Amino acid sequence: MGASRIGVLALQGAFAAHAAVLRELGADVREVRVPSDLDGLDALVLPGGESTTMSRLLVTSGLFDAIAARLADGLAALGTCAGMILLAGEVLDGRPDQRCFGAIDITVRRNAYGRQVDSFETDLAVNGLDHPFHAVFIRAPIITHVGAAVDVLAEHEGRPVVVRGGNVMVASFHPELTSDGRIHALFLSTFQGV
Ligand code: GLN
């Protein structure tokens, strides 16, 4: 099998850092800005950034419906922070016009870690990784509900922070901001079947 073709949603946010980690892992990476960029992709990564802005740009670019259709067809996806909010089934404390794909059965609350700890870093035990992952949380959402078919791969202080449902995986922090590619590798393994 050739290198996986991975799209990185590149409307706003930390897309360049994701692309760099994925290229390091040998993926064939394409930045996604218009619907035709989705053609032939094996998976899509939705980065951190600002979910309300990304939601608006997704609609104006015509990408929202195109991505929704590919996700409904089973396209694998990784969402981090704002990207997790976009993939969620329900968003609390969102803007009224904010949209989400409902690709994974979770509810998230935006900016829920609170002002005094808007950003923090911690070492997390993650199922499938043999030693802790250094996780960077930036104005992170909290996962407040996880559906029965969703697996929790990591928790922080009793709350899920990495979860997977089918071939959709999300993290409330930014695995692309460290030089450790193991979360991305774990994601690639979920649909490459390795
Ligand atoms: N607070 C942001 C939002 O609501 C997410 C923050 C991030 O992606 N670092 O979209």
Image (cartoon, grey):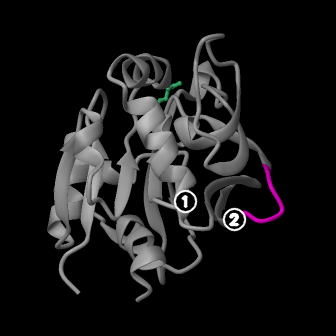
Given the current orientation, which residue lies at the most extreme top position? 96
Q: Residue 105, relative to residue 153: is it above or below?
A: above
- Which residue is painted at 46% across and 56% down in the image? 77
Q: Position of residue 113 (x, y in %)?
A: 64, 31
Seen from the viewer's position, the closer of residues 50 and 62 is 62
- Which residue is painted at 23% across and 62% down in the image? 22
Is 102 covered by the magenta stretch?
Answer: no
Given the current orientation, which residue lies at the most extreme right position? 148
Evaluate if marks 1 and 2 touch, with contact meaning CB atoms under 8 Å apart.
Answer: no
For marks 1 and 2, the one nearer the N-term is 2
Q: Which residues are magenta?
A: 146-151
Residue 121 visible in the shown view:
no
Mark 1: secondary structure: strand
Within 10 angstroms of label 1, few (less than 14), some, or many (20 or more) residues?
Answer: many
Seen from the viewer's position, the closer of residues 137 and 36 is 36
Q: Position of residue 115 (x, y in %)?
A: 59, 19
Residue that carries the numbered disc 2 in the rendered image: 152
Q: Position of residue 97 (x, y in %)?
A: 60, 12
Quarter-wise, where is residue 49 in the image?
Answer: top left
